[in-house]
Image (cartoon, rainbow, N blue to C red):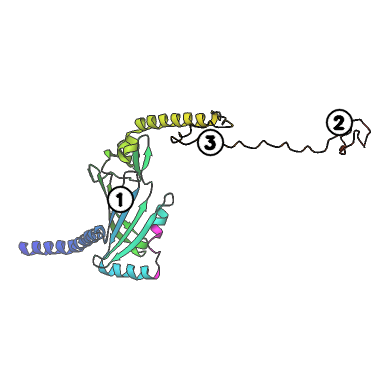
Amino acid sequence: MVDTRRSRRVIRTLAALTPVCLLLLGLVASGLAAETPTITEDYRITVNSVGDGHVVDTVKYSKDDFKAIKDVQKDKRGFLTRRYMAEDLTGEVMDFNVDLEDKSNSVVITYDKPGLAYCTEGEFCLYGYADKPTEESGGKFVFEEQSNVNSEFTLFTDQEIKTTTTVLLPKEATNGRYDSGDKAIKYEMPPASTTYGFVSQNKLMLSAVFGVLAVLFAGMLAFVVTRKPVDVAAGTAAGPSAPSPPGTPAVEAPSAPAAQAAPSGPGVCKKCGGVLKPGKHFCTRCGTPV
């Protein structure tokens, strides 16, 4: 009799606890489902030696979601670009391109951002990283984030997106680090001479050479401008004549005829300036004797 009563109590207790257990299991299942990302994004930034960034953003969907995204993109070509236009109002975006990859159910967006890294006080800075990197090795920084998103990329439905952001610094970069105070990635680059070649490496020598050449050119220019012209002699001295063969009588060279005096023109009266007529001994204009 006692065992029967105990069995009934156990059954009643289990019956009362069953709804609670089912509710807890449902909450756990829904929580796990909510934490499982339905979309994954790989956001990769490669920075070159002058601070420009090349971005490759790969967003991977389920097969059904990708088909829906693809259909919308066909009708509205700029549907997926609005997000980037909003993010980059203060910067410049170049060579923007969108590819839809059917094999991987992914949207691949590539573009360039000139001046992505700011050069301040001898070091480069990449701002906008609120959380610490989950991986940091040399010139590679990895950030991971999962959030509930409602935007163009989810067709305005609430979906969990896991984003992995990878930042690759230039090969020449040194002292790469994450600054939690400025929420930025900072790094240093070697002097410009190692980047820009022979001219930067030999600035002092080339400056001296070009300075000497400039002085020589200035001296030659001054000499050409200030030198005086040399007067050419009216006549040139005749050189010695060839000797006559033996037995040949000397022949005098014919002398040039004497130059005839140019006929004088009519005279002019010294007093009034009138023209004197030939044969007159006085000016026919004012009567002054000539």
In the picture shown, does residue 95 fall above or below 275?
A: below
Looking at the rendered structure, the number of numbered marks drawn on it comes to: 3
Kindly report which numbered mark, 3 or 2, lies closer to the viewer in this rendering: 3
**Given the image, on which type of amino acid does mark 2 rest?**
Lys
Asked whether the beta carbons under mark 1 and mark 3 sit within 8 Å of each other, the answer is no
Q: Position of residue 195 (x, y in %)?
A: 31, 40
Check disc 2 and report the residue beneath it. Answer: 270
- Say if the magenta span includes residue 201: no
What's the magenta region? 75-83
Would you call the spot at circle 3 few (<14 residues within 10 Å), some (14-19), or many (20 or more)? few
Magenta stretch encompasses residue 82: yes
Q: On residue 15, which mark appears? A: none
State the image coordinates of residue 200 (x, y, percent, origin top left): 34, 36
Q: Residue at x 47, y 28 (%)?
A: 219
Query: Mark 1 falls on what kind of element?
Result: strand
In primary-sequence order, the first of circles 1 and 3 is: 1
The amino acid at mark 1 is Ile
The tag earlier along the polypeptide, 2 or 1, is 1
Of 35 and 196, which appears nearest the observer?
196
Image-based side of 271 in relation to 141, left or right? right
- The residue carrying mark 1 is 45
Gap between marks 2 and 1 measured at Cα: 104 Å
